[in-house]
């Protein structure tokens, strides 16, 4: 056997330097080494079990692979781009270590089923890191929520002050989004949980392999049922990247609020110095660069999602080298999202909340106008539309006088409708407005307290 498994006898010359450069993926897929060795060991055990290779040779291979695993983790091994990818590099190292017995390992498999197997195993195990980090982020949000059930802040629509809500309620909105993201990860993993090993290059194999055995060893649910599909599709990677993109999108909204809220105009929160950056010219600056990078990271995720979809678009079955780029796109997306989620968790665990400023900002608005309309419906039998129209007139009157609703006298109110009583003032306070929204999923303290308990039970 010759040592370079990537070049066959039909190739009379070595690969040109440029071909080697464009074709080699070892710089990217060396990250799969652990999964590659795990899958190879499972494959080898199966070859022994089915008597395709002898126990003696199989054990040599398994010991050799275990040694490579140790050597790589101790940084003792230098990969070579001449061997193209992680699969061929490991085979070449195995050959160096145990000689030509190494050549038996590739019986009944191909790099095409090998790479999908490794890649699925990698996504399965690394998706847990994303999930754990999202959980930590939810924990940070819930801990802010616990302390701020009664903190009134302006709720916005169209970026205009809309209605008073509690800060806890606002934080729990993100907890829900992130909860669905975690569910998306679970869904994605349950769909990809089929073992492609044994599909061969595309047709299956004539060796009497046992795919159920490797499926069990590798922790997949079932073997894939169609060998062509097994090596052709990357829908699982697309779904994983889509899920990462959704997370990045949610993080970018959270980041944007951190940026806005820490600006002088809002001043709702203060970023600690260790999470702020300075300017090279303006000595007074404290900038939220971390959150800004998180806000922008979603852009490359969307680009990556687009890129993998387009790679697959129109690609004839079965395997083509185009598919090799899937890992670069996935690893990059994964790294960006994991780092962004870590940064956002750190920010949330360290921000100071200026409760008073949040609170005062809602008092300078007509945020309880809807409560006034609701009062007219409940107490004076208005239809909602009539109440809405009359309240509009009252707000118009108040703003012309440059006064807030609670600064309008009862006499002035009665000019709009003689039946309005002093009771109306109760609903004009933002705190009371917030307290009154006790419908399921609303912002009242009672509902929010229940939501916090629900979130703790469901997500932490
Ligand atoms: N490095 C390759 C990839 O990631 C492995 C599969 C190569 N298969 C082949 N037929 N050249 O796609």
Image (cartoon, helix red, strand yellow):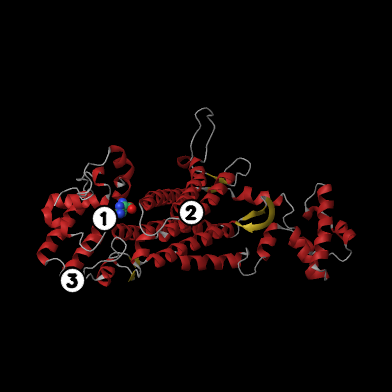
Which residue is located at x 36 percent, y 67 percent? Answer: 193
Look at mark 1 in the image and give the residue it sits on.
34
Query: Earlier along the polypeptide chain: callout 1 or callout 2?
Result: 1
Q: Give the quadrant of the C terminus.
A: bottom left
Neighbour tally class for label 2: few under 14, some 14-19, many 20 plus, Cα within 10 Å: many
Which residue is located at x 63 percent, y 41 percent? Answer: 265
- Proximity of marks 2 and 3: CB atoms separated by less than 8 Å: no
Query: Earlier along the polypeptide chain: callout 2 or callout 3?
Result: 3
User: 431 or 164: nearer the eye?
Assistant: 164
- Helix, strand or loop at label 1? It is helix
Question: Is residue 395 placed above or below 265 in the rendered structure?
Answer: below
- For the residues labelled 3 and 1, the Cα–Cα distance comes to 24 Å
Query: Earlier along the polypeptide chain: callout 3 or callout 1?
Result: 1
Which residue is at the far top? Answer: 281
Look at mark 2 in the image and give the residue it sits on.
245
Left or right of residue 377, residue 128 in this image: left
Look at mark 3 in the image and give the residue it sits on.
50
Which residue is located at x 26 percent, y 59 percent? Answer: 110
């Amino acid at each position: 056997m010759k040592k370079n498994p990537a070049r066959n006898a039909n190739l009379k010359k070595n690969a040109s330097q440029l071909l080697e450069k464009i074709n080699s993926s070892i710089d990217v897929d060396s990250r799969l080494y652990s999964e590659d060795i795990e899958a190879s060991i499972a494959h080898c055990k199966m070859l022994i079990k089915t008597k395709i290779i002898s126990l003696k040779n199989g054990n040599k291979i398994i010991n050799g692979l275990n040694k490579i695993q140790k050597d790589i983790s101790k940084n003792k091994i230098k990969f070579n781009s001449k061997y193209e990818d992680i699969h061929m590099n490991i085979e070449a190292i195995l050959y160096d270590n145990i000689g030509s017995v190494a050549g038996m390992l590739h019986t009944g498999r191909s790099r095409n089923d090998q790479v999908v197997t490794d890649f699925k195993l990698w996504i399965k195990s690394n998706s847990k890191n994303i999930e754990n980090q999202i959980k930590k982020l939810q924990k940070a949000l819930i801990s802010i929520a616990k302390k701020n059930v009664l903190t009134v802040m302006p709720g916005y629509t169209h970026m205009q002050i809309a209605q008073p809500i509690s800060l806890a309620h606002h934080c729990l909105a993100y907890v829900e989004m992130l909860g669905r993201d975690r569910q998306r990860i679970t869904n994605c993993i349950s769909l990809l949980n089929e073992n492609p090993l044994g599909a061969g290059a595309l047709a299956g194999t004539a060796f009497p392999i046992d795919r159920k055995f490797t499926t069990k060893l590798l922790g997949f649910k079932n073997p894939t049922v169609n060998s062509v599909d097994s090596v052709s599709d990357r829908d699982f990677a697309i779904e994983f990247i889509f899920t990462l993109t959704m997370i990045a999108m949610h993080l970018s909204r959270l980041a944007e609020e951190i940026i806005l809220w820490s600006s002088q105009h809002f001043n709702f929160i203060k970023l600690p110095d260790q999470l702020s950056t300075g300017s090279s010219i303006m000595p007074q600056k404290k900038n939220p660069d971390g959150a800004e990078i998180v806000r922008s990271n979603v852009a490359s995720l969307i680009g990556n999602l687009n890129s993998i979809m387009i790679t697959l678009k129109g690609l004839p079955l079965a395997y083509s080298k185009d598919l090799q780029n899937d890992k670069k796109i996935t690893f990059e997306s994964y790294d960006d999202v994991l780092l962004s989620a870590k940064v956002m968790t750190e920010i949330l665990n360290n921000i100071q909340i200026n409760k008073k400023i949040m609170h005062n900002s809602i008092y300078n608005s007509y945020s309880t106008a809807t409560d006034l309309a609701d009062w007219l419906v409940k107490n004076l039998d208005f239809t909602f539309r009539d109440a809405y129209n009359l309240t509009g007139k009252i707000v118009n009157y108040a703003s012309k006088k440059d006064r807030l609703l609670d600064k309008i006298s009862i006499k002035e109110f009665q000019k709009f409708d003689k039946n309005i009583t002093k009771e109306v003032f109760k609903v004009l306070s933002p705190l009371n407005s917030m307290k009154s929204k006790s419908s399921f999923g609303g912002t009242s303290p009672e509902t929010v307290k229940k939501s916090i308990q629900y979130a703790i039970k469901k997500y932490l």
